Structures are given as structure tokens and as C-alpha cells.
Amino acid sequence: MTLQEERHVLVVYPHPDDEAFSVAGTLRLFHDMGVPVTYACLTLGEMGRNLGNPPFATRESLPEIRRKELMQACEAMGIGDLRMMGLRDKTVEFEDDEKMIKLVNDLIVELNPSLIFTFLPGFAVHPDHEATGRAVVEAVRRIDKKYRPRILACAFANDTVEKNGEPDVTIEIQSVKADKLKALKAHASQTAWMMQDAEKRVDTGDVSIDNWLNYEKFYTVTFND
């Protein structure tokens, strides 16, 4: 798919590094096109399971480290408008539904995006991912269909393709693969071990890694009205 001009792109994910794995290359392409991008990151991922490889963070220092990593990743992606929304990691699923919907709606009202990236409810695995995707979809559903922004959603559940078919949107990001790698490496506290393994697999010609670094795939969220 060739990217079209957008009025404004809004990205809503719960954790630092969600964006790097799922949409970093696409966001860099939008930046290079001159499309404004806002990233609303709901938490600092302070409960992340990793502390670096070898470890360089502690439970006390991890929130600040992840904040700085997020800023570095956004620089790699060309995101100039980063919103740290201040929710607590691993508690997004327990937030009041209407509070979460309002949070998303307020962003939509302010920014008037034509496109939103988030997670696909039911297929996002992590409870915080699920809660985020649900809030975005419901906030958009409540908007008059004449004015709704489009939603492109990431999904990671093992049964995603079985139940939904292949993603209907595939974006080639080969030209900005280096920027995606920079964004992933910026989140070193969480990704160092994985990136070391990925780079070894690239060297062996692993097709799955090559596809992961060259293409980003999404499902278009649709509404039955």
C-alpha cells in the first residue's frame, strides 16, 4: 500500500516500545511526507520485565530510563508531538471505561486526526493493549460516521489470521528500515536481547526477520452502521 496524505496521524499505545515494534517505519514515512504525528503513550512501562542485557536498570530507575528511551525512539521516528499520559503500567485494564474513552476523545477533538493507530481489540494479547484498543475503537464509534477517523490496528494473538484473515493493509518500510531499527534499539532496557538475536538472524538470511523489518501490517477497523 502507498501511503496517502493524512490531515493528522494519532498513535495510541499503552507502553514505550509498542510503537517501535508495530508502526515505527510507517510513522517515519509519514514524517518524511510532512504529515503531523502525535503519539499518546499511556504509561512509562515501569513494570517492564527486562532491565537491560546485561542489566543496567533497577526497579527504581526503570521509569526514568524508559521515559528517556521513549524520547530517543520518537526522535528516530521523527515524532515531534509525544504525549506521556501518566497512567500506570499494568493498570490500564482497570481504568474506568468512560475515563479511557474520554481520554481518547479529548485527543481526537484537539487534533482532528484522519488516521489512528492502536491495537485490535480481542487480538492484542496484553490486558493493557486490549484496554487501549477498546477505548480507541469505542471513542471513534461514538463519532458521527461522516467524521470518523480511520483506525489501523495491530494484532499479535496466535489465532489472529485464523479468525480475521491476513491483515488488509501492508506498508513497505524498507526505505526507512534503519530508522525502525534505531527506534527499536532506543528501547534498550527491553529490546537489547531481542535485537541481538534479530541481527544474528538477519546475517543468516532469515526471511521472517527480513519481512518483519521491511513490512508493517494492520487491520482496518470497521463499524456496522
Image (cartoon, helix red, strand yellow):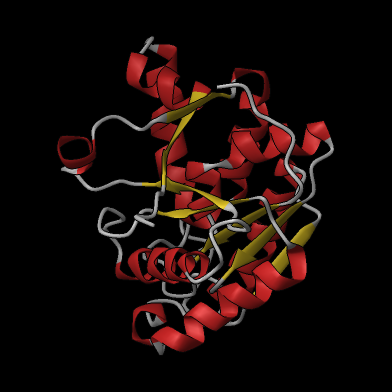
Q: Is residue 95 left or right of residue 38?
A: left
Q: Is residue 178 left or right of residue 31?
A: left
Residue beneath the point at 37% across and 70% down = 128
Residue beneath the point at 26% across and 53% down = 123
In the image, farthest residue toward the top: 205
Q: Position of residue 115 (x, y in %)?
A: 62, 49
Q: Is residue 81 above or below residue 156?
A: below
Residue beneath the point at 38% across and 9% down = 205
- Camera sees residue 53: no
Q: Is residue 70 left or right of residue 120?
A: right
**Residue 74 vs residue 64, the one in the foreground:** 74
Q: Is residue 11 above or below residue 213?
A: below
**Residue 20 vs residue 146, the one in the foreground:** 146
Residue 208 in which image quadrant: top left
Residue 1 in which image quadrant: top right
Q: Position of residue 127 (x, y in %)?
A: 30, 69
**Residue 80 vs residue 196, the one in the foreground:** 80
- Camera sees residue 39: yes
